Image (cartoon, rainbow, N blue to C red):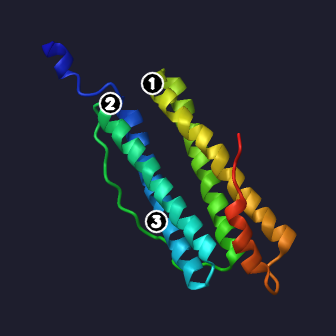
Amino acid sequence: MKDLLKLKSSLSEEMENILNEQVKVEAYASSLYLAMSSWCDEKGLDNAAEFFAKQSDEEREHMLKLFRFINDRGGRAISPEVINIPTEFDSFRGVFEQALEQEIFVTQQFNEMSAKCMELKDFTTFSFLKWFLDEQVEEEYVMRRILDLFDVIGEEATGRWEIDRQLVKVSYDE
């Protein structure tokens, strides 16, 4: 039993560092979406403001899920510093384009982490990451469908408000 207690972590140091980097990415996404929510609220786009507030909460939940996993495996999760969050955005469409870019980046990060898990034969972490990989399919899909609204409706005249009204109907059905 004493030998077992000496084992600091069943998580490799390399994987712990990679997961802590992803904690930062999720914290950044949460802060970014909160800034987008505020920007949309200021523009009178109530549904978009609520959408991004929920996205912010979801990203924070993802961060905490990673955080707990690191600690549960005997590692040390690090609370991230979040800097360089934009507060101004070029356009309503631009907010969603930036959100899609963020989601694509996150998907790439999870793909790279999964590949590293296979390399390290860390199947426990890979199994944990599978949930995030599945989640990213939904995240990207929803952002793409919302961007489709801009193409179909357009932002001219009352288009912005119609898009804002319609975006609450966009969902991912598996």
The quarter of the image holding the C terminus is top right
Q: CA distance from mark 2 to mark 3?
A: 27 Å
Residue closest to the eye, 165 or 86? 165
Q: Earlier in the sequence, mark 2 or mark 3?
A: 3
Residue at the (76%, 58%) spot, across then down: 145
- Give the residue furthest to the right: 152
The location of residue 171, given as percent across then percent down, is 69, 53
Query: Which mark identifies residue 31?
Result: 3
Q: Is residue 124 visible?
A: yes
Reading the image, the residue beneath label 1 is: 124
Inspect the image, locate mark 2, and give the three-letter code of the amino acid beneath it: Arg
Q: CA distance from mark 1 to mark 3?
A: 29 Å
Residue closest to the eye, 174 or 144? 174
The location of residue 48, given as percent across then percent down, is 62, 71
Placement of 46 over or under 168, stated as above or below: below
Reading the image, the residue beneath label 2 is: 73
The location of residue 137, given as percent across then percent down, is 66, 44
Q: Residues within 10 Å of mark 1 (few under 14, many from 20)?
A: few
Query: Which mark identifies residue 111?
Result: none
The quarter of the image holding the N terminus is top left
Q: Earlier in the sequence, mark 1 or mark 2?
A: 2
- Quarter of the image holding residue 77? top left
Contact check, label 2 and label 3, Cβ < 8 Å: no
- Give the residue furthest to the left: 2
Placement of 4 over or under 67, stated as above or below: above
- Quarter of the image holding residue 96? bottom right
Contact check, label 1 and label 2, Cβ < 8 Å: yes
Placement of 75 over or under 154, stated as above or below: above
- Give the residue furthest to the bottom: 157
